[in-house]
Image (cartoon, rainbow, N blue to C red):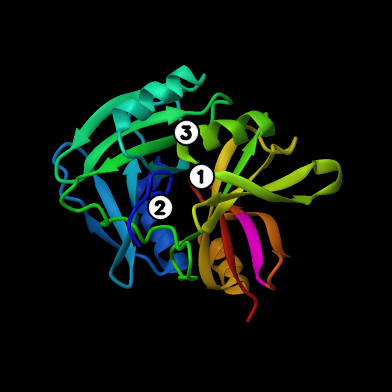
């Protein structure tokens, strides 16, 4: 599909040990890795079945951000979106800049402090990253769901609707935890927003990647130094989800079948 304003188009792991992270996620996700060719720092691209999904980068020296997964949202104009995000009460951690032959990007945060990237891919190759989020067809190794846990659900919903055109069309009652509200991007569902649980240290996006076998994934995570934060739990549709932490401390989530 062609990238649209508001699509998730890339996923990035910022890690304290890029070699160890590659060894952990490769067997777990079936990803293969290649060097991006960037001269100024080590950036590894991960892919599956010939489709690039995201990248790994070493956390810059002195950076305060812990090991984390970040998402990139496609925008029509990075500079205009950066200005709009700032005006709406968000913050800018990295002003717009260019990556040769890739695109223009900025590192930003919503008004609740949740960080993400915005990106305007180069016009010569606008569809390069369009398959990172498997929006319409389940694909192993790709992102399957984007979930925002926030300290202000109504405010966050309004912010992302205004900035990216997302619509909240339905919600699911979670009892004392409040509602789980689903975001739609055009003709498909992009993810959901919920109130941050007390046990979650900070408001954040969580990205769910698809695996073939959720129980095999549990064993692989444990065997390779990761930690299960939430055991496989059935979700609507008959699949299972889990939440985990990699050996460097980055949280992530998986979706898959129980074989």
Of the two numbered discs 3 and 2 in the rendering, the one whose residue sits closer to the viewer: 3
Q: Quadrant of the N terminus?
A: bottom left
Q: Which residue is mark 2?
A: 21
| Location of residue 201 in the rendering, given as x and y in whole percent from the top left corner | 65, 33
Q: Is residue 107 left or right of residue 227?
A: left
Compared with 225, 236 (above or below) is below
| Location of residue 120 in the rendering, given as x and y in whole percent from the top left corner | 28, 40
Q: Which mark is residue 163?
A: 3
Q: Residue at coordinates 50% horizontally, 70% vertically from top-left? A: 138
Q: Which residue is mark 1?
A: 250
Q: Which residues are magenta?
A: 239-243
Q: Residue at coordinates 27% horizontally, 52% vertically from top-left? A: 44
Q: Which mark is residue 201?
A: none
Q: Earlier in the sequence, mark 3 or mark 2?
A: 2
Residue 145 seen: no
Q: Earlier in the sequence, mark 1 or mark 2?
A: 2
| Location of residue 15 in the rendering, given as x and y in whole percent from the top left corner | 40, 42
Residue 57, image quadrant: top left
- The Cα atoms of the two marked residues, 3 and 1, are separated by 27 Å
Label 1 with label 2: CB-CB less than 8 Å: yes
């Amino acid at each position: 599909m062609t990238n649209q304003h508001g699509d998730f188009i890339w996923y990035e792991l910022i890690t304290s040990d890029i070699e160890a992270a590659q060894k952990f996620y490769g067997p777990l996700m079936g990803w293969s890795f290649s060097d991006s060719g960037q001269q100024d720092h080590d950036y590894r691209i991960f892919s599956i079945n010939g489709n690039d999904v995201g990248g790994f980068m070493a956390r810059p020296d002195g950076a305060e951000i812990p090991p984390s997964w970040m998402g990139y949202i496609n925008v029509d104009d990075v500079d205009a979106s950066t200005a709009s995000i700032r005006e709406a009460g968000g913050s800018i951690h990295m002003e717009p800049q260019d990556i040769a032959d890739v695109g223009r990007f900025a590192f930003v945060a919503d008004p609740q402090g949740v960080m993400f990237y915005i990106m305007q891919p180069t016009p010569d190759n606008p569809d390069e990253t369009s398959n990172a989020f498997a929006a319409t067809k389940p694909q192993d190794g790709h992102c399957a769901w984007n979930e925002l846990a926030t300290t202000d659900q109504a405010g966050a919903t309004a912010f992302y609707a205004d900035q990216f055109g997302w619509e909240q069309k339905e919600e699911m009652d979670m009892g004392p935890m409040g509602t789980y509200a689903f975001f739609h991007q055009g003709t498909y569902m992009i993810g959901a927003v919920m109130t941050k649980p007390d046990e979650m240290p900070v408001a954040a996006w969580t990205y769910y990647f698809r695996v073939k076998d959720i129980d095999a994934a549990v064993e692989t995570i444990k065997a390779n130094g990761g930690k299960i934060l939430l055991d496989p739990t059935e979700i609507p549709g008959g699949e299972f989800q889990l939440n985990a932490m990699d050996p460097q401390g980055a949280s992530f989530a998986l979706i898959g079948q129980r074989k």
